[in-house]
Image (tube, helix red, strand yellow):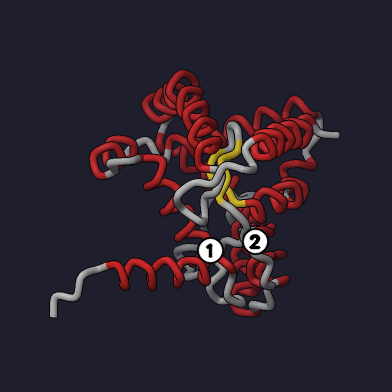
Amino acid sequence: MPRLTSTLRLCLAALLLALVGCASTSGGNPLDPFEATNRKIDAFNESVDQAVLKPVAKSYQDYTPNLLQSTVKNFFGNLRDMWSVVNNGLQLKPKETAETGARVVVNSIIGLYGLIDVGTPMGLQRHSADFGQTLGYWGMPSGPYVVLPLLGPSTVRDTVALLVDRHGDPWSQISPVASRNQGVALRLVDKRSQFLGMDDRLNEVALDKYSFVRDAYLQKRRAEVRRGPPSDLDELDEKNNDIDNKSKPNTQ
């Protein structure tokens, strides 16, 4: 079993134990009943990010040539597109499946295994999709919001889907394991470097960073499954909006 999958399973097991331990604790947000535990895990993730990942990503951004950074981003983006083709197909989206599939073919052949993004200038847009989105499309409830150790924001549905997504990632089939893990680390650092500019802005606009990230994540995931059957997130949000509207004073 690949080391990455084993690590993911350990993270999921740790999360499950933590949630079971506080199952009787309910937060103020119905979408986040495990808020107390989630905040602790989020604080742990933040400390790891500040101590390790962010400094490495900053050095990567400062000292790696822009052309090489673009090449890394394009290559792993092309791998991600391959899995998106599968999930768009499972969601019965012919246009997105065909367009993303054509993008993969063009970038893999003309773009030298995805090192060069040829598809975007040709008008072949990326339609990202993962298995969590596929489950949501077919009506599986998202479940509560959770924060995974080292992995960050998720929901119960997306957490279950992570195992399938990991196996669906073409890079997970790379051998030897050492090379695969090096690629995983490079992709992680490259991805983190793309969000360095958001840190200061997030700290400026967010009175509560945890709540801001949670709400942004849930809104993003809700939008990504919007074209499928309504999920429990939509129903809960509608109820919350109704409560908020009723609680507001009538100014008319």
Rendering coords of residue 50 (x, y %): 43, 23
Q: Which image quarter: residue 99?
A: bottom right
Q: Residues within 10 Å of mark 2 (few under 14, many from 20)?
A: many
**What residue is shown with label 2?**
84
Rendering coords of residue 128 (x, y %): 57, 61
Is 110 displayed left or right of 236 in the figure?
right
Q: Can you name the residue that lies furthest to the top here?
A: 51
- In the image, what residue occupies the spot 71% across and 34% down? 17
Q: Nearer the viewer, residue 25 or 85?
A: 25
Q: Nearer the viewer, residue 31 or 225?
A: 31
Q: Tag 2: residue type?
A: Ser
Query: Which mark is on residue 46?
Result: none
Q: How many marks?
A: 2
- In the image, what residue occupies the spot 65% across and 58% down? 132
Rendering coords of residue 135 (x, y %): 69, 65
- In the image, what residue occupies the spot 64% across and 53% down? 158
Q: Which element carries disc 1, helix, strand or loop?
A: loop
Q: Distance from label 1 to label 2 (Cα)?
A: 9 Å
Q: Nearer the viewer, residue 236 or 203?
A: 236
Residue 211 vertical position relative to residue 157 in the rendered view, above or below = above
Asked if disc 1 and disc 2 are in contact, CB closer than 8 Å, the reply is: yes
Residue 95 vertical position relative to residue 133 in the rendered view, above or below = below
Q: Earlier in the sequence, mark 1 or mark 2?
A: 2
Q: Tag 1: residue type?
A: Arg
Residue 117 vertical position relative to residue 61 in the rendered view, above or below = below
Q: Which image quarter: residue 147?
A: top right
- Is residue 70 visible in the rendered image? The answer is yes
Is 222 displayed left or right of 5 in the figure?
left
Q: Which image quarter: residue 57?
A: top left
**What residue is shown with label 1?**
126
Q: Nearer the viewer, residue 133 or 211?
A: 211
Q: Can you name the residue that lies furthest to the right here?
A: 1
